[in-house]
Image (spheres, helix red, strand yellow):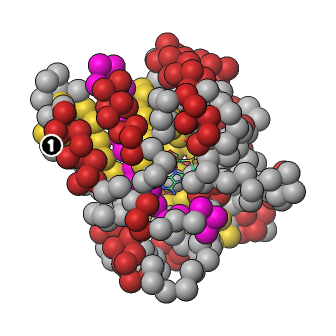
Amino acid sequence: MDHSMIDKLGRPLRDLRISVTDRCNFRCRYCMPAEIFDKDFKFLPKKEILSFEEITRLSTILAKRAGIQKLRITGGEPLMRHEVSRLIAMLNQIEEIDDIAMTTNGSLLPLHAKKLKEAGLKRVTISLDSLDDEKFRYINGRDVGVNKVLEGIEAAEDAGLGVKMNMVVKRGMNEDDILPMARYFKGTNVILRYIEYMDVGNANGWKLNHVVSKKEIFSMINEEMPIEPVNPNYTGEVANRFKFKENGHEIGIISSVTDAFCSTCSRARLSADGKLVTCLFASDGHDLRDVLRSGASDDEVAKHIQYIWENRDDQYSAERLKHTDKKQIKKIEMSHIGG
Ligand code: SAM
Ligand code: SF4
Ligand code: SF4
């Protein structure tokens, strides 16, 4: 079989995000609002979740047959999955995979960072939306203080993991935190990236006027702490990268709403229950769990995925404004596919 899979718009399949659980110890208001994700909410039962062996098999097939080299582990909160470092160690055995990263809320890193590094994890992206303790406790919906996340960053750095930060910016929630975050991380080794608030899922009540644009974020920072663009590391890089003129430290903005990057999107997502999702804004994924559990050979699984990818023509963000005035379409929740 050819080593690359190309979709209908000419985009190769290059990297895979694996969600290992739909559960989370936070209830961020823009992602898993506590009123919806309450004690009666039906999270996936264990038997419906892919085992580490199944995830490793799929990743191996994609590495060998599609040329995937990068994996990112996400959730829900990936550190809520029992023994997730054992999965990292298994994925690290795949010869073709040269980069394994994780997106986490950071709160459990003090317990896990060392094990994760030993298992072969290279980098973590930690999410933090405010340095204001009271506000952060409100946003995460579980009264977790900023210190917990700062301790997580420290634990990751001590373990030798690369660290980046994600801050989702939502108007009315935390645009006042854009500058304090820039000031704080400018003097560290950590790269901060602002993310435009996206209309993922249907639970968060997204509106276009909640979005603080890349342009606005750039101007706010640039006025106080002048920044200049840095060339992209590779095609398909999602963050617009800048550096502070003062000390050269990097900072990024991910403009998924106002400046879509669909034309170079080479990312597939695997949900915890084994669905291959070809766009963050898809209504549903393509079930791979039943295929795996039906006794299909590696060749058959690879052909199935190739068929799905070759029929992909998603470009939701590039067409977003056409969708927003229409009736709400069903979309998969962020906590299922992990960003
Ligand atoms: N629980 C982990 C965490 O928070 O880092 C991993 C999963 S979380 C869904 C992945 C990332 O998506 C986080 O950085 C989160 O802030 C971001 N996110 C969630 N909902 C979002 C939205 N509507 N728009 C933009 N980013 C969002
Ligand atoms: Fe949990 Fe991450 Fe969603 Fe917050 S953004 S509720 S930490 S999955
Ligand atoms: Fe990729 Fe879909 Fe996002 Fe476009 S909207 S960049 S196709 S995930």
| Left or right of 74, for residue 16 | left
Q: How many marks?
A: 1
| Left or right of 331, for residue 233 | left
Image spot of residue 71 (x, y percent): 50, 45
Q: Is residue 80 visible?
A: yes
Image spot of residue 84 (x, y percent): 68, 35
Q: Which residues are magenta?
A: 186-204
- Principal SS element in the magenta part? loop
Q: Secondary structure at mark 1?
A: strand
> Which residue is nearer to you in this view: 3 or 230?
230
Q: Residue at x 47, y 35 (%)?
A: 130
Q: Residue at x 52, y 77 (%)?
A: 307
| Left or right of 54, for residue 334 | left
108 in magenta: no
Q: Which residue is mark 1?
A: 229
Image spot of residue 246 (x, y percent): 14, 24
| Left or right of 207, for residue 38 | right
> Which residue is nearer to you in this view: 92 or 64?
92
Q: Residue furthest top?
A: 158
Q: Is residue 168 visible?
A: no
198 in magenta: yes
Image spot of residue 157 (x, y percent): 46, 18
Q: Residues within 10 Å of mark 1 (few under 14, many from 20)?
A: some
Q: Residue furthest bottom?
A: 326
Q: Is mark 1 within 8 Å of ligand 3?
A: no
Q: Residue at x 54, y 72 (%)?
A: 282
- For ligand 3, the image quadrant comes to bottom left
Q: Quadrant of residue 255?
A: bottom left
Q: Residue at x 49, y 86 (%)?
A: 326
Which amino acid, mark 1?
Pro
> Which residue is nearer to you in this view: 258 or 175?
175
Q: Is residue 64 above or below residue 206?
A: above
